[in-house]
Every structure is written in structure tokens, then in C-alpha cells.
Image (spheres, helix red, strand yellow):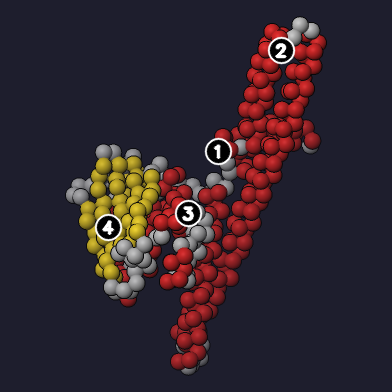
């Protein structure tokens, strides 16, 4: 059993996969690199020592002490990285388990609320219906948060598979504009779409790309104070498709812009205006687009609106 664990420690790709890290971030791989650096440093030190010191035993002793000190430092640093990686893995697994466990009771709660509001069981007063509506809205927000946490957990543990297929980004956007129509109308926001003719189809995971565009549209509509507009553009650029969502909403303060793709971050002016939101949407969007081989970014000015864009390879 102990032998298997020792062998497992030397299986660097397996360890990296376990922690959900790339090779260059994996503690075991970093320790290997440090070991090679220590060996190279020892050889250089020995060569320099023999040039300046005549006694080879003193040179060997100095080199051994130097190597031992460097090895201890490398081992200590690597152990620290490994503990951090293990803590991060356990956190992601905990979030995944909790999210899975919460989905079923929340779905059952929604089903019961729907049943009570339908009046099929018994007559419900207008006041009771209002209470049920508030419960349903809060339950929906909890479901959204649970869903976001589950996606984040899958991203961090490299368990979010890419199911690539050919699809039209223009058609996908048109579908989402129709779905967001009632929300936009209620918010007094108009949505326009401008796209080039004969746009090529994209070979990627349409479900994940859909999630990114949903986040862009939801944020654009949600953070417009009064009557506003959302403009969507889709263009072909060389072998890529460029997509952007521009709004005339509250914008993002300059000092907050460097944090905008971080987990749980919400700009101060946004929190003042709109208290709802988990701060995970843009973090998820960035992770999805980068995994899909694309780029994501934005430009914004406080009080003048924001433009969020993404670039995806056609194939």
C-alpha cells in the first residue's frame, strides 16, 4: 500500500490531474524543475570552487552543504504549494458535493410552490399568492447560485467537458434575444443585432458559448438605469468570429476594471444599483472562452456604459 503511494507521488501527470492544475503549476513538476536547477547549481559551484580552492575535499563539502540547503528550501516551498493545491481541490470537491445536494430540494421546493400557486390543491388568497411568488423568486436565485457554483467547481477541477459541434453564433444569438425579450421590455431596453452576411459556423461547445452570451446580455440589460439600448455585433475577422455586446448602462469604475473577471467580484456602483448577483458570471465566461481557444475582454466608462467582447476561432 505504501509502495503504491510512493509510486503515485512520482506519477507527475496523475498528480497534476488530481489537483486540476496544468503541468507548470503542479507542485511535483515544480519540485522536479527545482531539483534539476540544484544539480546544475552544484556542478557550476564545484567548477568555480576547484578553480579558486586547491583542496578538493573543502570544495566537495561546500557543494554538499549548498546543495542540501537548496534542496531543503525547494522541498519546503513545494510542500507549501502542495498543501495549497490540496486545499483548493478539497474546496472544489466540497462545493461540487454541496451544489449537487442542494439542487434536488430546491427543485422540489419550486414544484410545490408551483402547485400551491396553481390553486389545484385549495383556494389561495391573493396575499398568499404574493408570498409564494416571493418564495419562488428567492428559490430561483438560489438555484442560479447553485448552478454557478457547480460550473465553477467543474472548471477548477477540469471536469467541465467540451462537447464540440458545428453551430451558427448568429442563430444562437437570435434565440437568446427572443428569450430575453420580455425581460428587456420590462426593463425598457431595446436590443438590436447587426451581423455580417454569410458568417461561417463555429465548431465549439454551443451550450457553454450560450452561457457566456446569456451572461453578457443579462448584465447589459440589468445594469441600465432607465430607458436604454443594447447593441450586439457579430463580425468575421480572418479565421475568427468577433462578438460584442454594447450597452449604455452604469459602466464600470476605472479602479474596479482590473478585478472584473475575478470570482465573486462585483463593482461598487453595480452593488449600489443592483443587489442581486453572485459575481461568478464573468469569471465563468472567461474560463469558458479561454478553454474554447478564444479571447474575451471589455471596455467601459463609468456612467457611459460597457462593451464586452469575445473572439472565437471558426474551427
Q: Nearer the viewer, residue 314 or 166?
A: 314
Tell me the residue at 25%/48% (across/down).
235
> Where residue 294 appears, x then y in whole percent?
38, 43
Q: Are marks 2 and 1 in contact (CB under 8 Å)?
A: no
- Report how far apart the C-alphas of labels 4 and 1 lie in the structure: 35 Å
Q: Earlier in the sequence, mark 1 or mark 3?
A: 1
Farthest residue, direction top: 54
> Where residue 282 appears, x then y in whole percent?
44, 56
Res 237 seen here:
yes
Q: Earlier in the sequence, mark 4 or mark 1?
A: 1
Q: Are marks 4 and 1 in contact (CB under 8 Å)?
A: no
Res 284 seen here:
no
Does residue 83 sit above or below 212 in this rendering?
A: above
Label 1 Cα neighbours within 10 Å, binned few <14 / some 14-19 / many ≥20? few
- Report how far apart the C-alphas of labels 2 and 4 lie in the structure: 67 Å
Q: Earlier in the sequence, mark 2 or mark 3?
A: 2
- Nearer the observer, disc 2 or disc 4? 2
- Report how far apart the C-alphas of labels 2 and 3 lie in the structure: 49 Å
**Mark number displayed over residue 22:** 1
Q: Secondary structure at mark 2?
A: helix
Give the residue pinned by disc 3: 259
Give the residue pinned by disc 2: 49
Left/right placement of residue 228 relative to residue 38 reads left
Q: Are marks 4 and 3 in contact (CB under 8 Å)?
A: no
Q: Earlier in the sequence, mark 4 or mark 3?
A: 4
> Where residue 216 appears, x then y in whole percent?
37, 59
Q: Secondary structure at mark 3?
A: helix
Give the residue pinned by disc 4: 232
Image quadrant in which you'd find residue 26? top right
Does residue 218 sit above or below 89 in this rendering?
A: below
- Report how far apart the C-alphas of labels 4 and 3 lie in the structure: 24 Å
Amino acid at each position: 500500500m505504501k509502495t503504491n503511494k510512493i509510486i503515485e507521488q512520482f506519477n507527475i501527470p496523475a498528480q497534476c490531474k488530481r489537483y486540476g492544475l496544468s503541468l507548470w503549476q503542479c507542485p511535483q513538476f515544480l519540485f522536479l524543475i527545482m531539483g534539476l536547477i540544484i544539480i546544475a547549481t552544484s556542478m557550476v559551484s564545484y567548477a568555480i570552487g576547484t578553480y579558486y580552492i586547491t583542496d578538493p575535499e573543502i570544495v566537495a563539502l561546500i557543494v554538499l552543504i549548498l546543495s542540501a540547503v537548496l534542496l531543503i528550501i525547494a522541498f519546503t516551498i513545494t510542500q507549501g504549494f502542495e498543501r495549497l493545491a490540496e486545499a483548493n481541490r478539497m474546496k472544489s470537491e466540497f462545493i461540487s458535493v454541496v451544489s449537487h445536494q442542494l439542487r434536488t430540494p430546491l427543485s422540489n421546493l419550486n414544484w410545490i410552490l408551483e402547485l400551491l400557486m396553481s390553486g389545484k390543491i385549495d383556494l389561495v388568497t391573493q396575499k398568499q399568492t404574493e408570498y409564494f411568488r416571493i418564495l419562488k423568486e428567492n428559490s430561483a436565485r438560489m438555484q442560479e447560485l447553485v448552478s454557478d457554483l457547480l460550473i465553477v467547481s467543474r472548471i477548477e477541477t477540469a471536469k467541465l467537458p467540451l462537447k464540440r459541434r458545428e453551430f451558427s453564433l448568429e442563430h444562437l444569438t437570435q434565440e437568446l434575444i427572443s428569450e430575453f425579450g420580455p425581460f428587456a421590455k420590462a426593463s425598457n431596453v431595446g436590443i438590436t443585432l447587426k451581423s455580417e452576411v454569410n458568417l461561417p459556423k463555429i465548431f465549439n461547445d454551443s451550450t457553454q458559448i450560450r452561457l457566456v452570451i446569456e451572461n453578457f446580455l443579462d448584465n447589459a440589460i440589468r445594469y441600465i438605469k432607465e430607458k436604454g439600448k443594447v447593441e450586439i455585433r457579430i463580425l468575421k475577422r480572418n479565421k475568427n468570429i468577433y462578438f460584442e455586446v454594447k450597452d449604455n448602462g452604469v459602466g464600470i469604475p476605472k479602479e474596479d476594471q482590473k478585478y472584473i473577471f475575478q470570482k465573486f467580484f462585483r463593482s461598487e456602483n453595480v452593488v449600489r444599483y443592483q443587489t442581486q448577483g453572485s459575481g461568478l458570471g464573468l469569471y465563468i465566461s472567461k474560463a469558458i472562452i479561454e478553454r474554447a481557444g478564444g479571447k474575451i475582454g471589455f471596455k467601459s466608462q463609468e456612467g457611459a456604459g460597457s462593451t464586452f467582447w469575445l473572439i472565437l476561432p471558426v474551427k
